[in-house]
Amino acid sequence: MREPVDLADRLALFSEHWSPKVVARLNDYEIKVVKIKGEVVWHDHADTDELFLVIEGHLRIQLRDPDERNITLGPGQLYVVPRGVEHCPVAEGDVAAMLIEPAGTLNTGAAGGDLTAAYDDSLLDPSADDD
Ligand code: NI
């Protein structure tokens, strides 16, 4: 049997920003936790929606949809960025969030660049290292 995933416990295992870590899988999707501070790059995901659920702090998601607007999320609030909509998350302070997106989705979408995070599933089963 699998153990429950405690998001706070997983978040306590790392400190770097903009480096999403897989904590669970759901069919072809992955559940990731991420720490965010400052601004990533404007990007979109041509093939998929992207779910942000804020756990700690306040996250602003700038959107270039037809209305060009900002969404602000606090703890317990989620937003789904539709596929193809250019977005740029920005955190004034420290933010912890959970993402749900198809396996293989890059954090910077098609934009690429220095902030593109390497795939990291080391927190999928952190106890594995203790065996
Ligand atoms: Ni994105």
Image (cartoon, rainbow, N blue to C red):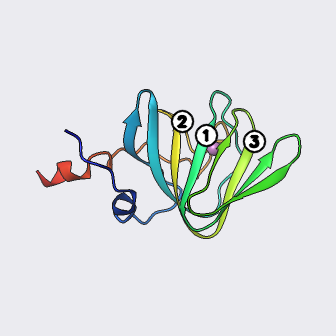
- What numbered label is drawn on residue 9? none
- Label 1 sits on a secondary structure element that is strand
Q: Which quadrant: the N terminus? A: top left
Q: Residue at x 79, y 55 (%)?
A: 70
Number of other residues with Cα within 10 Å of mark 2, as a class: few under 14, some 14 to 19, many 20 or more: some
Q: Residue at x 68, y 42 (%)?
A: 81
Q: Nearer the viewer, mark 3 or mark 1?
A: 1
Residue type for callout 2: Thr
Which amino acid lies under the numbered mark 1 shown in the image of this protein? Glu
Q: Which residue is mark 3?
A: 86
In the image, 12 versus 41, the foreground residue is 12
Please, which residue is most extreme toward the front here?
76
The first of marks 2 and 1 along the sequence is 1
Q: Quadrant of residue 40?
A: bottom right
Give left or right: position of 129 versus 104: left
Rendered position, 27 above or below 76: above
How far is mark 2 from mark 1, CA to CA?
Answer: 9 Å
Q: Amino acid at mark 3?
A: Glu
Read off the residue under disc 1: 50
Q: Residue furthest left?
A: 131
Q: Nearer the viewer, residue 75 or 117?
A: 75
Mark 3 or 1, nearer chain start: 1
**Beta carbon at label 2 within 8 Å of ligand 1:** yes
